[in-house]
Amino acid sequence: MMLDRLAADNDGTDAAAGSSPVDIRTLVTDHHREVFRYAYRLVGRQDDAEDLTQQTFMLAQQRLSQLRHPDRARGWLFAILRNCYRKAVSRPMPLAATGLALDVDSIPDTVAGQTFDQETLQAALDALSDEFKLVVVMFYFEQRSYKEIAEQLQIPIGTVMSRLTRAKSRLRACLLNPSGHSQGRRGTAP
């Protein structure tokens, strides 16, 4: 399994140097579910989310010595995941049609008193461009402030606010009129 392979690949040099008291096995055990859920929210496909999650932990294992604060491992892993995602979406790839099954519990599932199932909500997220989706996921899933998002993405805080406002507007329009906004994501996938 991936965890055993990562543990075997980690020859102990990082731990021997005293650079990080956390090993990759602990990171995977403690954070795999959260990292996978975050990846799934970004890509909307289980296969791609699994690949992105694996890539995240592979890079984390290689850079374990960079984890200075083990109590902040979740945020560190999310940053690695975001960077992997951003790098992947910069390469155009065809998007395959797939069924959606996701628990999007941190984004409100009501708009104007209407309730939406998780598939509909994920499809609406998938319809957003990556610049909007990333801000929405960081704001609702990671519960980051505007300032934190701006710092992480290296964009002005006004841009974060604007993107979040536009993204919520597009989500609302897609959820209230699914037939008019059901074209899905643009032609790339991570």
Image: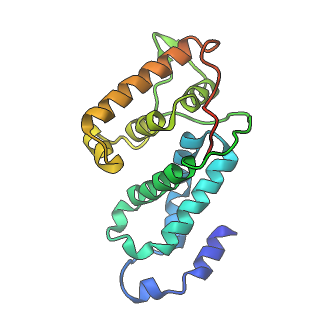
Q: Residue 38, image x and y in percent? A: 52, 46
Residue 41 vs residue 114, the one in the foreground: 41
Residue 26 vs residue 181, the one in the foreground: 181
Q: Residue 103, image x and y in percent? A: 58, 36
Q: Residue visible at 36% across and 40% down? A: 143
Q: Residue visible at 60% across and 74% down? A: 6
Residue 182 appears left or right of 98: left
Q: Quadrant of the N terminus?
A: bottom right
Q: How is the image coloured?
A: rainbow
In the displayed structure, 104 sits above or below 66; it is above
In the displayed structure, 44 sits above or below 83; it is above
In the displayed structure, 144 sits above or below 60; it is above
Residue 56 vs residue 4, the one in the foreground: 56
Residue 122 appears left or right of 105: right
In the displayed structure, 7 sits above or below 16; it is above
Count of numbered tags = 0
Q: Residue visible at 26% across and 37% down? A: 157
Q: Residue 13, image x and y in percent? A: 46, 88
Residue 79 appears left or right of 174: left
Q: Residue visible at 50% across and 38% down? A: 130
Q: Residue 66, image x and y in percent? A: 38, 72
